[in-house]
Image (cartoon, rainbow, N blue to C red):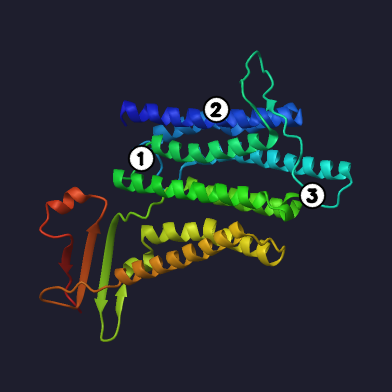
Amino acid sequence: MSVISLIKAVVARLLFAVHGVLVAWRVTDLEDDQIYYLLLIPVVLLAVEMIFTLKFTENGEWKWFCPSVLLYLASVVPGIYLLELQLYENRIDYRDEQGWDECVSYANDSTVALSEVNGVTIPISLSESDWVLALEQILLCLLVLGRWLLPKGELTRDQLSQLLLVYIGMAADILEFSIENLKEDNVKCNAVLIYMILGLWAWSLLQFTLVLTSVSGAKVRMFRKTKKIYICRACLCCENEIWALSITLLMQDGPFLVMRLYLLIHHNVVNQMMIFFTCKNILVIMLQAYRILIVCTDSNQIEPAEDSGDAVEVMEDASEPSKKSSQSGDMVALDVKGE
């Protein structure tokens, strides 16, 4: 691994660590208890993870999984959980003080700065709700930036660029899901709904620990011709694109749609934005299912041999365009003698 890649790997983990420290600092200030500095344990483990990863991997990163992102989420997500729950408790206390039946936003918007620790302070003052929003926004921005800085591993530049574009779209949807739903009047003082929304928010963030892209790599397709049916091994094994679409469907779009429908139907949270994003979720899921069907159908297309049509093995490599240019065609077909 080059020196530049090594420096970028260190910088990415330093950014993760700084944000983790900032979240732990803010939570400790709010709760006034030093025990919350235990949130820094995953930050410390980032250094161990970096040494282990750089030592035992050839390209400076694992193939399918990114442990540095997992440790980053383990340090930041619990802290944001606690900050969101503190906002909920403030709303409940304010409602009880005013003697109201309905819950409203906490009226105290005075700015709060971080306390001084060993002579170190940060000259930033925000309201309690703005602190939570800022930390969530930084989290999602660093997930995209960190993936860009981290070594590519076995990803090509084409795959990495597409993965980053996918990450940006995912981050925007996740941020919108948490912000829009938590500000609903029927949700603000409902602890169960807040736990459910935060749980789905945390579940969707785990996608960033998986290094999957819809750019297909090397694929091997085996076809066997019978009288009525063609059997395709590629579709059964699931291409990389199908895995990526399925994970997005199970970890983000599917749960988000279920939660929004639950709010619409059971809790009567009906407004223009809720209806719009629910329809958007339905449309996205339909398009994902359609894309999976198209990929499987395309995988099952027959590539006949010139002389013998009994069986054909087709090898494609979409991740190495340089090899394609040196060949007369885009695919190499190997005739296999039929039984």
**Residue under label 1:** 152
Q: Position of residue 172 (x, y in %)?
A: 50, 47
**Comparing marks 3 and 2, which lies closer to the viewer?**
3
Q: Which of the two labelled residues, at mark 3 and mark 1, occupies the earlier sequence position?
A: 3
Task: Say which residue label 2 marks.
Answer: 18
Viewer-side residue, 321 vs 279: 279
Disc 2 marks a residue whose amino acid type is Val
Residue behind mark 3? 103
Distance between the alpha carbons at the discs numbered 3 and 1: 48 Å
Label 3, label 2: how far apart the Cα atoms are: 35 Å
- Position of the N terminus, as image quadrant, is top left
On the image, the x and y values in percent for residue 17 come to 54, 29
Element type where label 3 sits in the image: loop
Q: Which comes before the other along the chain, label 2 or label 1? A: 2
Q: Secondary structure at mark 2?
A: helix
Name the residue at 48% across, 65% down: 283
